[in-house]
Image (cartoon, rainbow, N blue to C red):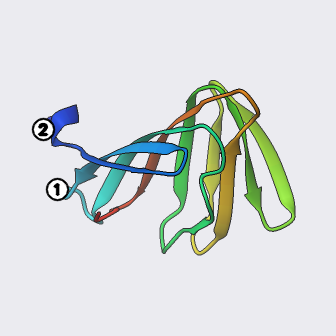
Amino acid sequence: MIITQPQAIREDWDQTKSWNYKLKHLSPYQSIVYAEITNDHGEVHTNDIERIYYIIDGAGEFVIGDEATKVEKGDVFTVPARTIYNYHSLPNQTLKVLLIMELWDN
């Protein structure tokens, strides 16, 4: 199966650009999301599935509760299920990530 970029769902907000590649043939349904963040992503939460971020380029920081973790190109960062978190790029950086997550049905 192939999902081309024109088939992905584009959704942008504030300083974030994203493309959602929906994988409805998997059980449970999942999404692969490519995103470029040039400031603050905004607070989000996971559902029942852990989220996995691969950092393609740039540098940033993930914040879960009071704990902040810096990430950079080549890192993998995971967010546990049922967690509220936020992330952002570092100043003068564009954080490019590939996210594996539950189906984002936008």
Q: Please identify the residue farthest to the left as the structure is shown.
A: 1
Above or below, 14 relative to 36 = below
Instruction: Judge from the rendering whether residue 26 lies leftward or rightward of residue 49; answer left or right.
Output: left
Residue 55: percent from left, percent from top: 58, 33
Element under disc 2:
loop
Residue 92: percent from left, percent from top: 72, 27
The structure residue drawn at horizontal position 72% and vertical position 36%, both measured from the top left corner, is: 71
- Mark found first going from the N terminus, 1 or 2: 2
User: Looking at numbered disc 1 in the image, what kind of residue is underneath it?
Assistant: His
Q: Quadrant of residue 4?
A: top left
Question: Crowding near pointer 1: few (<14 within 10 Å), some, many (20+)?
Answer: few
* Quadrant of the image containing the C terminus: bottom left
Residue 1: percent from left, percent from top: 12, 38
Element under disc 1:
loop
Which of the pair 66/102 is nearer the observer? 66
The structure residue drawn at horizontal position 53% and vertical position 61%, both measured from the top left corner, is: 50
Which of the pair 29/73 is nearer the observer? 73
Instruction: Judge from the rendering whether residue 60 lies leftward or rightward of residue 101; answer left or right.
Output: right
Q: Quadrant of residue 102?
A: bottom left
The structure residue drawn at horizontal position 44% and vertical position 42%, both measured from the top left corner, is: 17
The structure residue drawn at horizontal position 80% and vertical position 68%, both measured from the top left corner, is: 65
Q: Are marks 1 and 2 in contact (CB under 8 Å)?
A: yes
> Mark 1 — residue?
25
Above or below, 17 relative to 81 = above
> Mark 2 — residue?
1
Q: Quadrant of residue 24?
A: bottom left
| Disc 1 from disc 2: Cα separation | 9 Å
Which of the pair 62/74 is nearer the observer? 62
Q: Please identify the residue farthest to the front as the structure is shown.
A: 14
Question: Crowding near pointer 2: few (<14 within 10 Å), some, many (20+)?
Answer: few
User: Looking at numbered disc 2 in the image, what kind of residue is underneath it?
Assistant: Met
